[in-house]
Image (tube, helix red, strand yellow):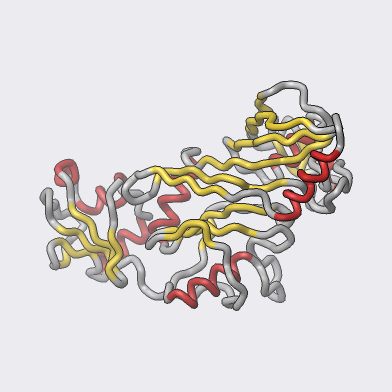
Amino acid sequence: MHDMQKDGEWLVSRLRDGDANQPLGNLLREDWSLPRKQVHLLFQHKEILLDGSPVAQHAHGEAGQELRLRICQPEPFGVEPADDPLDVRYEDDHLLVACKPAGILLHPTEKHHLHSLDHLVAGHFNRTGVKSKVRHVHRLDQDTSGLVLYAKHAWAAAMLDELLRERQIKRTYLAFVHGSVRSARGTINEPIGRDRNHATRRRVTPNGDAAITHYKVLTRYDGVTLIECSLETGRTHQIRVHLSHIGHPLLGDSLYGGRNLYISRQALHAARLHFPHPFGGHKITVEAALPPDLQALQNKLREVPI
């Protein structure tokens, strides 16, 4: 992975020894994961420069030469910017990690929805001079709180999507579930598909998509267990479905059998993201402590003797 510096609308890097072994077009598509269509358009519009001069796809560069790509052209946000502040946990020229409060949508599902996390990110971009489409890399349910990763330009989005497919973006959740989970650690490897009897619900089914959830017990309370979950796959409602399937639904998750015990939303929080930076490869870890409602839940549980 190459370190890319932002210079206005351009991303700038220096070629390395191995980069000279193939045409620049192949290098960008195959080694640098830039989408094929975007590579074609950049060359066509002379927006790829080698030491300041436009080059063709078949050209070979040399180690040390400066490669510039006009990737960061201004583009519409895609949603109306909101004035409310955004809880930013990490940000650089290529990506942003925001902490979503429970109760708001990640992205608008109807035109009249004007207060999603995407709207808040657009507002942040607007205030900070970022003229980019809002691109979330993964999703959270409306009533799940926690960390969400965003790309700040199309190339970063393509790179992060690839990291997600390769399971290099590690997502860790904290979940309060009903019952005492017996095993200190475990893995739930059960396929998930749609529930024919309910429009939004998912269920474990042999014909579903592969889904793998790892869990670790952190604390046992009276009739409740706090566990840490990590995902290998990202199916809709995966943690909620899997934990309900093994008899430990989330507190507050009425859709999957949970009861409102000290909380009226699913007690699930995306607490940690860990991934290699798409440009440079250095490791990034972002964490978010439990929000106030889950802290209050935990305090209540601590008051009840086991």
Where the C terminus falls, by quadrant? top right
Q: Residue at x 14, y 51 (%)?
A: 60
Vertical placement of residue 121 versus 220, above or below? below
Front one among 82 and 189: 82
Q: Is residue 38 left or right of residue 192?
A: left
* Numbered-mark total: 0
Residue 42 percent location from the top left of the image: 29, 65
Residue drawn at x 77%, y 30% as measured from the top left: 220
Residue 293 location (% of width, % of height):
75, 54
Q: In the picture provided, is 207 more to the left or to the right than 89?
A: right
Frontmost residue, 61 versus 290: 290
Q: Residue at x 73, y 49 (%)?
A: 295
Q: Is residue 183 above or below residue 112?
A: above
The answer to which of 110 and 196 lies nearer the viewer is 110
Nearer the observer, 229 or 71: 229
Q: Is residue 43 left or right of residue 143?
A: left
Q: What residue lies at 21% left-to-right and 52% top-to-bottom?
A: 24
Give how far across and how far down residue 294 sits, in percent: 74, 49
Relative height, residue 129 to residue 15 (above, below): below
Left or right: 28 in relation to 244: left
Residue 91: image x %, image y %?
Answer: 44, 60
